[in-house]
Image (cartoon, helix red, strand yellow):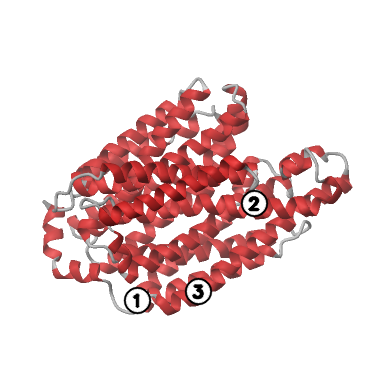
């Protein structure tokens, strides 16, 4: 392997590890919440904000981060974001109050919001060859997705053997390693056209995404009859509508709405958002099923997600091999079909189903994700011109983040509504507060415990059927609309490979 090629893959490896810890940080904290409640004397509201603050910052800052990278240099901002991520992780680990941890989580979310789109945006620079870029995209997506199920496993082990701050300390060496790799191995790139920063667009996008994201979070937690949640949701929609109108008129727009004119970016984004929607709904539900119905602890719940990781790796490897031969128009629908089969099998889960049955269907779901998600992202990113890679990647990732948040809120509400409806005479506090509270309240009463678990499984089945329906509709749609020919981004990189090569090697 040539030295320049080796440097590219080493850089990708460092970026993949950085994306892995971002995925970890989304789920690892769920295991630490009971410990944080005691050690930091945190009430329920503070526990919710430990997770919500990270999600809100992640959603709000992605679009401005991509635009800033396009203007001032993606390598420069990515390097700074990695250092900030490491510093914020240290602040989280050694926080002594709830307020300190929430503030540190906000900074951590800001850093992650910059790392995600910028690390994706440099892939076309590192890998101008289409086939290599598709393989790099598969590695990038797999690393991002692996962090989600690994979070509970690693978090449970760390808390059992160390203190809760160790779940954040693991980020520090990886962030430093990735920063060094970016400094030494990643070429600088930016949009050659020096545009002014659209400050009005920055403010509108940040406030709109924050209001929309928190509105869905609140509705998912409190219920769909919450007036404040609907007010936040309406404000978010209004602000984002104003943002889109402003983007059409601004000479230095934060995002180029013409990006959606490219069929690759448009449909790649649509299918990536749909897959993310279904994926986060499943991640929200299955750990609850393990703990409340199967009765395992936090670490055991994380370990039982490992078959999904196996399926994810298998699906990603098949996608990597199949994509150059069959193309996205075949591989993406195939992944959606596999995903639908796994989710449909999951919808048949009963209270008495053995774990091996669950292990089978989450493995199939993982394989479907590994097949479909990298291809969807690759189709979208391949359609971006290099000078717009930062803002285009940021838009794609912001929409994915919004889809994950909305998926948890909407699908969680579907589950909760069916759960409460199936409780019957038990539809009262503390049973209606959720399956965990219901199981705790029913301890010692076998009939009541069975009723609570049956109600939850019924809600989970309905939610998984809904996710299945989304994939069933999306599969033939992908076969119909995906471009048959290579995108303009591929044509552009093939026309000028020497420029990218010399920028990288120099």
Q: Which secondary structure, mark 1?
A: loop
Q: Residues within 10 Å of mark 2 (few under 14, many from 20)?
A: many
> Relative to 481, does residue 202 appear above or below in the rendering?
above
The residue that appears at 40% across and 43% down in the rendered structure is: 60
> Relative to 49, does residue 277 appear above or below in the rendering?
below
Side of 125 where 140 appears, left or right: right
Pick whichever of labels 1 and 3 is earlier in the sequence.
3
Q: Residues within 10 Å of mark 1 (few under 14, many from 20)?
A: some
Point out which mark residue 475 bears.
Answer: 3
> Relative to 49, does residue 471 appear above or below in the rendering?
below
In the rendered image, is residue 223 in sight?
yes
Q: Position of residue 193 (x, y in %)?
A: 14, 53
Question: What residue does disc 2 label?
Answer: 413
Q: State the CA–CA distance, disc 1 to disc 3.
A: 14 Å
Q: Please name which of the two marks, 1 or 2, marks the residue nearer to the observer.
A: 2
Pick whichever of labels 1 and 2 is earlier in the sequence.
2
Q: Residues within 10 Å of mark 3 (few under 14, many from 20)?
A: many
Front-lying residue, 243 or 149: 243
The residue that appears at 64% across and 51% down in the rendered structure is: 413
Q: Which secondary structure, mark 2?
A: helix
Q: Position of residue 261 (x, y in %)?
A: 31, 68
Q: Please name which of the two marks, 3 or 2, marks the residue nearer to the observer.
A: 2
Question: What residue does disc 1 label?
Answer: 483
């Amino acid at each position: 392997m040539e030295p320049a090629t080796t440097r590219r893959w080493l850089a990708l490896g460092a970026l993949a590890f950085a994306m892995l810890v971002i995925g970890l940080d989304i789920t690892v904290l769920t295991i630490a919440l009971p410990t944080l409640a005691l050690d930091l004397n945190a009430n329920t509201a503070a526990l919710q904000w430990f997770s919500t603050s990270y999600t809100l910052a992640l959603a709000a800052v992605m679009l401005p981060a991509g635009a800033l990278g396009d203007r001032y240099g993606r390598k420069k901002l990515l390097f700074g974001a990695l250092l900030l991520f490491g510093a914020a992780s240290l602040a989280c680990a050694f926080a002594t109050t709830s307020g300190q941890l929430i503030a540190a989580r906000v900074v951590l979310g800001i850093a992650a919001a910059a790392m995600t789109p910028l690390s994706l945006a440099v892939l076309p620079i590192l890998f101008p060859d289409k086939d290599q870029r598709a393989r790099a995209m598969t590695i990038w997506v797999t690393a991002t997705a692996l962090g989600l199920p690994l979070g509970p496993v690693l978090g449970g082990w760390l808390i059992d053997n160390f203190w809760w701050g160790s779940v954040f300390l693991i980020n520090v060496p990886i962030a430093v390693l990735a920063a060094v790799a970016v400094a030494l191995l990643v070429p600088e790139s930016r949009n050659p056209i020096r545009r002014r920063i659209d400050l009005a667009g920055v403010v509108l996008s940040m406030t709109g995404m924050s209001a929309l994201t928190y509105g869905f979070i609140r509705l998912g937690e409190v219920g769909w009859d919450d007036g404040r949640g609907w007010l936040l949701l309406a404000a978010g929609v209004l602000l984002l509508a104003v943002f889109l109108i402003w983007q059409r008129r601004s000479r230095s727009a934060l995002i180029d709405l013409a990006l959606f004119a490219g069929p690759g970016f448009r449909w790649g984004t649509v299918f990536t958002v749909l897959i993310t929607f279904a994926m986060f709904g499943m991640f929200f539900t299955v750990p609850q099923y393990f703990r409340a119905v199967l009765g395992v602890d936090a670490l055991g719940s994380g370990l039982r997600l490992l078959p999904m990781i196996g399926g994810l790796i298998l699906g990603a490897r098949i996608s990597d091999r199949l994509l150059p031969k069959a193309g996205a128009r075949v591989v993406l629908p195939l992944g959606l079909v596999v995903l639908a089969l796994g989710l449909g099998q999951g919808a048949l889960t009963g209270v008495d189903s053995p774990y091996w049955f669950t292990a089978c269907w989450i493995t199939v779901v993982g394989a479907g994700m590994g097949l479909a998600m990298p291809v969807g992202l690759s189709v979208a990113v391949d359609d971006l011109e290099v000078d717009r890679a930062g803002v285009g990647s940021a838009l794609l990732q912001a929409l994915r983040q919004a889809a994950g948040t909305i998926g948890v809120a909407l699908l969680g509400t579907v589950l909760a509504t069916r759960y409460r409806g199936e409780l019957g005479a038990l539809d009262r506090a503390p049973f209606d507060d959720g399956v965990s509270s219901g199981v705790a309240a029913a301890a010692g009463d076998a009939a009541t415990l069975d009723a609570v678990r049956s109600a939850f499984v019924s809600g989970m089945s309905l939610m998984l059927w809904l996710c299945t329906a989304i994939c069933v509709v999306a599969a033939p749609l992908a076969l119909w609309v995906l471009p048959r020919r290579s995108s303009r981004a591929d044509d552009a990189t093939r026309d000028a490979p020497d420029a990218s090569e010399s920028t990288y090697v120099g």
